[in-house]
Image: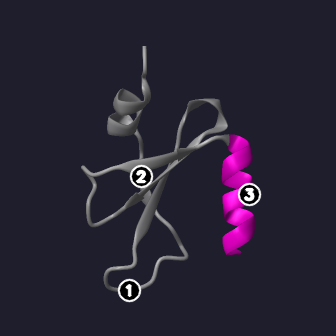
């Protein structure tokens, strides 16, 4: 059974410190198992990208 939708709905989201002003905001949430979710703050009910711990580390490494 896929718990991701429930986990995303219950997640504590925070705006990234790298978000710009206006329409460039991203939110992230820590999930179980070291995963992270990323979503567009303008569309909180829209899709979210869920990354494993390894994928998150690579993702952050490419944007920092």
Element under label 3? helix
Q: Nearer the viewer, mark 1 or mark 3?
A: 3
* Disc 1 residue crowd, few under 14, some 14–19, many 20+, Cα 10 Å: few
For marks 1 and 3 on the same chain, the one whose residue lies earlier in the sequence? 1
Indicate which label's residue lies in the foreground, 2 or 3.
3
**Marker disc for residue 53:** none
Residue sticking out furthest to the top? 1
Q: Which residue is mark 2?
A: 13
What colour-coding does the image apply?
A: one colour
Q: CA distance from mark 2 to mark 1?
A: 18 Å
Q: Main SS of the magenta segment?
A: helix
Is 62 displayed left or right of 32 in the figure?
A: right
* Image-quadrant location for residue 51: top right
Circles 2, 3 touching at the beta carbon (< 8 Å):
no
Where is residue 59 drawn, in percent x and y?
A: 67, 60
The residue that mark 1 highlights is 21
Residue under circle 3?
A: 58
User: Which residues are the magenta region?
Assistant: 53-64
């Amino acid at each position: 059974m896929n718990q991701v939708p429930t986990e995303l709905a219950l997640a504590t989201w925070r705006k990234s410190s790298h978000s710009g002003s206006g329409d460039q905001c991203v939110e992230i949430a820590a999930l179980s198992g070291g995963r992270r979710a990323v979503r567009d703050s303008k569309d909180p009910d829209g899709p979210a990208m869920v990354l494993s711990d390894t994928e998150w580390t690579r993702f952050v490494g490419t944007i920092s």
